[in-house]
Image (cartoon, rainbow, N blue to C red):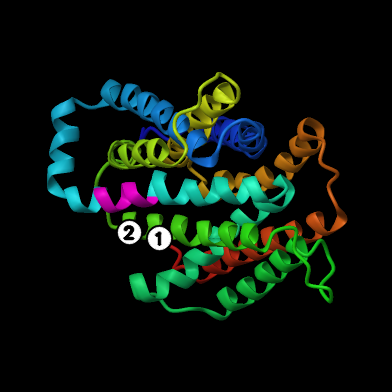
Amino acid sequence: MDGKNQKRAMLLGVSAVLLWSTVATAFKLALQDLTPLQLLSIASVTSVAVLLLAVIRKHPWCDVVAYWKKAPLKFAVLGALNPFLYYVILFQAYDLLPAQQAQPLNYTWALVLSLLAVPILGQSLQRSDIVALVLGYFGVLVISTRGDLLGMEFDSGLGVALALISTVLWALYWLINAKNATPSEISLLLCFLNGTPLVLLATLLVDGMPSGMEGVLSAVYVGFFEMGITFMLWMNAMKLATHTSRVSNLIFLSPFLSLILIHSILGEEIGGATYIGLVMIVSAVAYQQYAAYKTKPQS
């Protein structure tokens, strides 16, 4: 036996997708009472605690230190990207935009990944990538303008720009991490151990720590589920899967489930343009993945 278990992989994958579907709503709830930096500081500290507990259950601490000593500069750079810069910019985008706009725009990071892989990993841009990029970013335009493509008016042009910048940072994080031989959970912990002090320092200098408990529980929820345990659920699902594509395709459910929660909990009326644009973005990502699978040599 090779330890594979498709049924368990699907269960873990569904659990991860359901949890990820809640975080856009949690972002907006926390941002009602906290600044983006305050939200990030609480979430980051929570995530460090969760990741520490998860890692020390599987690995001796000396192994964690040894991996850090092999590439301290790389983990410093990765920590500056995630959690610091990526989430500061993402949370600011959520602060400026309705959740129904910010969430689908952030989903385009998979398209950015294919663009940045050209200069960083030396990969070539395929025709399917170009088609996906055109379709996906047309969907971005539909969502950002609420379907008024001729008027070209945005709820927040800065918010849209920040949401798209966050996708570049997230894609950069994964591309820099692509050749990292460190176990995923240790790598994530080391990134947060490097990035969280930057988050706390920035929060103290700019906003100060929150004085009350308003928004704190939502921020803890974000740290626990967006940055911590859900990532490990997904990682383990992919490791256990005998059919990886069946698990990875579950991620396409997340943005649609998220819209249901945004409507039912935040009370946002979901516009038709949001659904149309999201379908375009998800279709672009799905087509890109399908094309990559079809051109991959089959063993």
Q: Is residue 207 left or right of residue 93?
A: left
Mark-to-mark CA distance, 2 and 1:
6 Å
The reply to whether residue 4 is visible in this rendering is: yes
* Mark 2: amino acid: Ile
Q: Residue at left 38%, top 32%? A: 3
Label 2 with label 1: CB-CB less than 8 Å:
yes
Q: Quadrant of residue 41?
A: top left
Residue nearer the viewer, 125 or 249: 125
Residue 58 locus on image (x, y percent): 27, 25
Q: Residue at left 66%, top 67%? A: 136
Residue density around tag 1, few if under 14, some if 14–19, many if 20 or more, within 10 Å:
many
Residue 268 locus on image (x, y percent): 81, 41
Q: Is residue 116 left or right of residue 135?
A: left
Q: Is residue 137 above or below residue 206?
A: below
Residue density around tag 2, few if under 14, some if 14–19, many if 20 or more, within 10 Å:
some
Residue pointed to by mark 2:
176
Region in magenta: 76-81
Q: Quadrant of residue 107?
A: bottom right
Quadrant of the frame with the C terminus: bottom left
Would residue 281 be counted in the magenta stretch? no
The dominant secondary structure in magenta is helix
Residue nearer the viewer, 133 or 99: 99
Would residue 79 be counted in the magenta stretch? yes
Q: Is residue 274 above or below residue 215?
A: below
Residue 264 locus on image (x, y percent): 81, 32
Q: Which mark is residue 164?
A: none
Label 2, secondary structure: give it: helix
Quadrant of the frame with the N terminus: top left
Residue pointed to by mark 1:
172
Q: Is residue 223 left or right of residue 131?
A: left
